[in-house]
Image: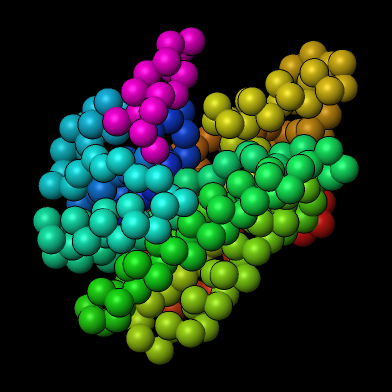
Amino acid sequence: MPPLHDKVALVTGTAAPNGIGQAIARRLAEDGAHVVVTDLGGTVEVDGVATPRLSLLETLAADLDTTGAALELDVTDAAQIDAVVAQVQRRLGRVDILVNNAGSLAGADNFMSTTPAQWTSSFNVNLLAPMMLSRAVIPAMQAAGGGRIINIGSTGSLGAEPGFGAYTAMKHGLVGLTKTIAAEFGPEGILCNIVCPGYIATDMHMAANTRIAGERGLSLDEVKAQRYTSVALRDAGRPADVADAVAYLAGPQARYVTGITLPVSGGVPYGI
């Protein structure tokens, strides 16, 4: 029997085909979970074409072949969060696993150039949203005798790199949120941990590389060479590498693991 047989997992930020969220959803489904995938409305660029996010979610849900669902969700909207969680509980009975993957590079800018609006946007997506989602699922987890909340942070949760001020601050805050939930709800069997990816070859990561290249007047290859010198393995990871860590924390083998930060970084040393 697969390790997550009949568990219900809710994963945010899963529309991007080359994203960490899709990799997590696929891995949890492979491990037997019923996976509910969510993302914003609107479109995302796929191979240069603006593609509806909901269409991508529906395709993903069909590929997963579970009794989960594809639902539109703006993680900064408290009313939408409550409605989606209620809908999942009506359809599937509960939420055993919450993966707060949705994130934003808003505020990924030089400190003096980052506007108050960017700080607020980064806070809303990267810190407030995981808090609201956790609050929404915790009562049902308490009633069920436990559950797993897994936050997706960053090596920016543990150290700092120039040019990512607000993003870094919020990802540090996510560590504090994780430890708070672990401490307060551990007695009720709710485990909360944070996975901290380093350089992972997603579209978001490549967008950051492109921005840095423009700011510094470098080619993309030069940017990669500079950034990956801090990686012991000298390369970016894959979304599946992060999904493997999430599957571990979601599974029975992590029954005595809570409140930890788990870097998936290829050995990035700065500030860690």
In the rendered structure, does residue 87 fall within the stretch colored magenta? no
- Please identify the residue farthest to the top as the structure is shown: 48
> Which residue is nearer to you in this view: 115 or 36?
115
Residue at x-position 60% and y-position 62%: 174
Q: Name the residue at 47% across, 34% down.
A: 19
Q: Is residue 144 left or right of residue 74?
A: left
Tell me if 243 is positioned left or right of 8 in this view.
right
Percent x, y of residue 198: 65, 44
Q: Is residue 155 visible?
A: no
- For the record, the magenta segment spans 40-54
Residue 249 occupies quadrant: bottom left
Q: Examine the rendered structure and indicate whether residue 229 appears above or below residue 38.
A: above
Q: Is-magenta flag for residue 43?
A: yes
* The C terminus - image quarter: bottom right
- Taking the spot 39% from the left edge, 28% from the top edge, the residue there is 42
Location of the N terminus (image quadrant): bottom left
Q: Where on the picture, by quarter, is residue 6?
A: bottom left
117 with respect to 222 (left or right): left
Viewer-nearest residue: 262 or 48 = 48
**Residue drawn at x 76%, y 33% as measured from the top left:** 228
The reply to whether residue 71 is in sight is yes
Residue 91: percent from left, percent from top: 12, 56
Q: Quadrant of residue 22?
A: top left
Quick check: 142 above or below 232? below
List x then y, in percent, for residue 155: 68, 51
In the rendered view, would you say 259 is above or below 31? Answer: below
Q: Position of residue 89 (x, y in %)?
A: 18, 62
Q: How many marks?
A: 0
Q: How is the image coloured?
A: rainbow
